[in-house]
Amino acid sequence: MKIRIGKFGLLNNYLPYYRLEQNGVRVIEALPKQLAEMFETGGIDFAPVPSFYYLKNQDQLKSYDFCVAAKHSALSVIVISKEKTLAGNDGSIAVTNQTTTSVNLLKIILRERGLKNRVVPVDESKGGELLKQCTHALVIGDEAIKARMAYRVVMDLGEEWRELTGYPMVFGISTARKGVDLSGVNRTVMDSVEWGEENVKVVVAEAERKFGMPVEFLEVYFKSLTFRMGVAEKRGLKLFEEKCHEYGLL
C-alpha cells in the first residue's frame, strides 16, 4: 500500500519536508484544518494535524516524533491590532477561519490574563480583512508573517504560552490511525528534519526564492521552531490539554 504523507502547506513545514521532497517523495500539501478533515475522510495516512484536533481524537490516533512547536515566540501565530494593546480594552478579536488550535490557545490566554476581549470567528484569513470586522485579529501561518510586517503585533501566542507555563507550545503533531505502524515513515520524515536543521542556509536560500521573504527573517523563523516531540514539548502539549479541559474547551 502506498502511504499518503501530508504536510502543512505553510512556511513552518518547509524546512522539515525540504529534503524529503527533494528526494522525490510525493507529499500532499494542505492547510492544517484541511489535513484534519482529510484524516476524517481517510484521504491521508501520516501527517501533522492541529494539536487541538489530536487531543479531541487521540483515542483513534497515534502520535509520532514530528511536530511543529514554538520554542518561545511563534512569530506566525499573532494578534494584530488597530490599538497599542489588548489590556484595558474590551475590543473584540476577529479570528481567522483557518484555526482550531490557536483560537483555543487564545481563549486560554485571555482567561489566564484576565482579559475580557470577545472572540469573533470570521470567514477570512488575511489580516487586513479581519481588522475590518474587529479592533484586533488573530492571524496564523503565512498570512500572519505578512501581517506582522504591515500591522501592530500586540500578542505572540507562543511567547504568551511560554511565559504562562515555561514550556513550548505545540501547534501541530504528526499522527496516523491507531493500529497502523508508520514508524518507518516517521523515521524518513525525521531524517529530513535533521538534514534541514544541518543545512539551514540551503533551505533558507530556497525559501527566499519560493516565498519572497527576507533571509534575515527566515533564519530567525526556522530557528524559533522545534520539530521534535521531546520531553518539554510533551509537557507543553499536556498542559495545553489540561487548560482546555479547565476552561471547557475539550
Image (cartoon, rainbow, N blue to C red):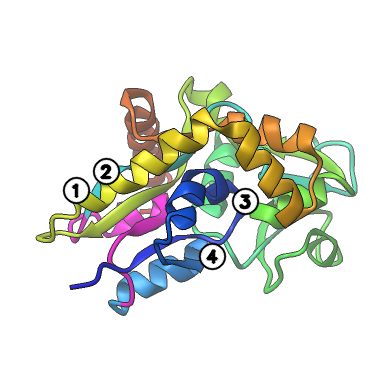
Element at label 2: helix
- Alpha-carbon span between mark 3 and mark 2: 22 Å
- Relative to the observer, which residue lies in front, 107 or 199? 199
Count all numbered tags in the image, as a single digit.
4
- Please give the residue where the numbered disc 4 appears in the rendered image: 31
- Relative to the observer, which residue lies in front, 131 or 247? 131
- Please give the residue where the numbered disc 2 appears in the rendered image: 187
Boundaries of the magenta span? 43-61
Residue 183, numbered circle: 1
Amino acid at dot 2:
Arg
- Alpha-carbon span between mark 2 and mark 4: 23 Å
Amino acid at dot 4:
Leu
Relative image position of residue 180 (x, y in whole percent): 13, 60
Can residue 114 be seen here? The reply is no
- Relative to the observer, which residue lies in front, 198 or 183? 198
- Please give the residue where the numbered disc 3 appears in the rendered image: 11
Contact? badges 3 and 4 (CB < 8 Å): no
Q: Nearer the viewer, mark 3 or mark 2?
A: 2
Q: Is residue 60 magenta?
A: yes
